[in-house]
Image (tube, rainbow, N blue to C red):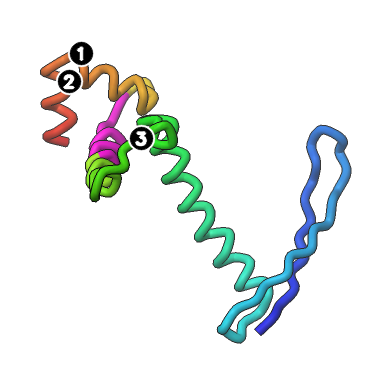
């Protein structure tokens, strides 16, 4: 099935509107609006996770290549990211700062692991 979706967005810098057209190929028969919504939801989740992993842990710079080490370290990083995200902080503290605090303070690290 092929579908065509159009979207309009406001360019804040110039105050003008821009219309974009997207073309989709897929195996499901559904409206282009629904397909567009599903694609945007998927990439929103995908981009947030990869961005978080790269900013917090520098994952793109990792050079682990032997056997399954990249997969294993990726799993450990995702577990650590989830532990850091579940910790409530007032005032807000960035994930990188939380990670640094864990490395500097045994007490902070234990509170993070206990969530």
Judged from the image, the secondary structure of the residue bearing numbered disc 1 is helix
Q: Position of residue 49 (x, y in %)?
A: 42, 45
The residue under the point 44% across, 44% down is 50
Q: Earlier in the sequence, mark 1 or mark 3?
A: 3
The residue under the point 33% across, 23% down is 90
- Within-10-Å neighbours for mark 1: few <14, some 14–19, many 20+: few
Judged from the image, the secondary structure of the residue bearing numbered disc 3 is loop
For the residues labelled 1 and 2, the Cα–Cα distance comes to 8 Å
Depth order, front residue of 68/45: 68
Residue bearing the label numbered 3: 63
Outermost residue, top direction?
104
Vertical relation: 78 (above or below) 7: above
Outermost residue, front direction?
66
Of labels 1 and 2, the one closer to you: 1
Are circles 1 and 2 on residues that touch, CB within 8 Å? yes
Image quarter for residue 21?
bottom right
Q: Earlier in the sequence, mark 3 or mark 2?
A: 3
Quarter of the rendering occupied by the C terminus: top left
Residue bearing the label numbered 2: 108
The residue under the point 34% across, 20% down is 97
Q: Residue 104: which numbered mark, if any?
A: 1
In the image, the segment drawn in magenta is: 77-89
Of labels 3 and 2, the one closer to you: 3
Depth order, front residue of 79/58: 58
Image quarter for residue 39?
bottom right
Depth order, front residue of 86/74: 74
Viewed as shown, does residue 2 lie left or right of 111?
Answer: right
Of labels 1 and 3, the one closer to you: 3
Q: Position of residue 10 (x, y in %)?
A: 79, 46
Q: Is residue 115 magenta?
A: no
């Amino acid at each position: 099935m092929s579908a065509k979706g159009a979207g309009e967005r406001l360019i804040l810098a110039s105050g003008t509107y821009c219309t974009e057209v997207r073309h989709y190929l897929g195996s499901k028969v559904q409206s282009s609006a629904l397909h567009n919504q599903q694609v945007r939801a998927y990439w929103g989740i995908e981009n947030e996770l990869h961005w978080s992993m790269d900013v917090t842990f520098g994952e793109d710079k990792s050079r682990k290549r032997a056997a399954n080490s990249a997969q294993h370290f990726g799993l450990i990083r995702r577990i650590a990211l989830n532990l850091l995200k579940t910790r409530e902080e007032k005032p807000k503290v960035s994930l990188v700062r939380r990670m640094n605090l864990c490395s500097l303070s045994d007490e902070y690290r234990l509170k993070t692991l206990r969530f």
